[in-house]
Image (tube, rainbow, N blue to C red):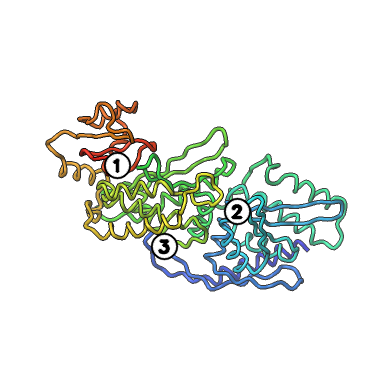
Amino acid sequence: MCFWINYLYLIIGISLLLSIYVSGYKNKMGFSTYWYKNYTIKSVHNTQLPEVTPDQDFLYWFSGFTDAEGNFLITLDRDYIKFRFKISLHLDDINVLHIIKSKLNIGRVTIENNRNRCSFIVEDYSNINVICSIFKNYPLHTSKKLDFENFYEAVCIKSKNNLSDSDKERIKFLKNSMNSKREIFLYNTGKSQIIINPNWFVGFLEGEGTFGIKTGSALYFQVAQKNTSPESLNAIVTFLTGLSNNTLQDSKISPLNVVSTTNIKTNVVSLVVNSVDSLYYYILPFLNESKMYTRKSIDYKLWKIALLLKIHGYYYLPEGKKLFLDISDILNKRYSTNIKTIDNIDERITNIIERSQDILKKDSPFDVKLNIPHAENVRKFSIANRSENPKTVYIYTEKGMLKGSPFTSFSSAHKALGLNPSSNTCNRYIDTNRLYKGKYIFSSNPIDRASRG
């Protein structure tokens, strides 16, 4: 029976290849765009199953999202063998599970209110075959692929009418070599290199990605994964660096660079892009053309506004800087059960979007059409707006002006606060009417008590 299962998978794969239509053009991101006919996935067994007709882009997305959030489970109880595919998320993300259920037309969505968790579960044996069919045609790339291979082999064994004792022992061995019990991470990639599909990557980043702002000023984009998946990490680096293949002619923008760091305590590898130029010229065009299904899209929208404020120079004006810092305050703090959750976050997001629309309508301080590095634009802006008078910094608390104010330089103000003289704190907070550490207000001019709020 397992032979026929594999044979039918092969026929499915060949049929898929025959249905591909190549558009023959390059899109903005520098990779070919492919359009496919809808491909119907059916059961590989004789059992009548509901047909699944999601589009190709979604199935690649689903594969990437499973690499990030999915689990393959086998339960053994004497002669009883049960298979389960599961994706568990925070309760706030339940909508994406309903989308997955609707598109695949299998499974169920459950809620655990006491844990603030929700899950998409497939455990009917016939529908498990649909799950196997999907991942045979839209392969996983992380160590999750190894768990699926164990899972799939066990499904093949279970398809026999009568299981021998050796069959049961084999399934038991496969079960005990999966997930947290896995000790061997060997990939059979000798014959074919991992090629990252753009939609797989979007699904993966919705589970393992971060759109962040560090120290209130530095933007970054990050995906992370255990160091047990080195081949997939290398493939992701290749995919990301490949986005810079669409470099503009006569551009001084450097190619995209990925910084890799490893947390020695958790063995998690983080792949980070933190150059403002790379984020704007390479990452942003790719993500603008991508479809997201989770609430990560909200983080992306806010992060994108912050990036536009920075790259166009609005960040270097008081109004733009305040908006940037307001975004930094709420970014990635959207879960309703998080103790650090911001009050009225939906209203604050709406307010940020409205303010950003007003600011971005104004003339841009930087001309990004020149395709010169952001640092060069900052340098030109600083020279053009340099004052002959020294920088004056007034620092206030609720009790009044800080001892030593006004300070004649940022460095002297930093020293008074016990900060490194080269800190960027004054630059970030001056004239924004925002509290630093909930206590200090920075201004370039004296302000009265009423203005300090």
Circle nearer the N terminus (3, 1): 3
**Vertically, is 59 above or below 225?**
below
Look at label 1 and name its amino acid. Answer: Arg
Residue 359: percent from the left, percent from the top? 28, 57
Residue 94: percent from the left, percent from the top? 59, 59
Give the quadrant of residue 181: top right
C-alpha gap between disc 3 and disc 1: 43 Å
Q: Which residue is mark 3?
A: 289
**Vertically, is 451 above or below 299?**
above
Residue 76: percent from the left, percent from the top? 81, 51
Is residue 30 visible in this depiction of the protein? no
In the picture, the quarter occupied by the C terminus is top left
Q: Nearer the viewer, residue 93 or 130?
A: 93
Residue at the left extreme of this rendering: 388
Q: Nearer the viewer, residue 136 or 397?
A: 397
Camera-near label (3 vs 2) is 2
In the picture, the quarter occupied by the N terminus is bottom right
Q: Which residue is mark 2?
A: 89
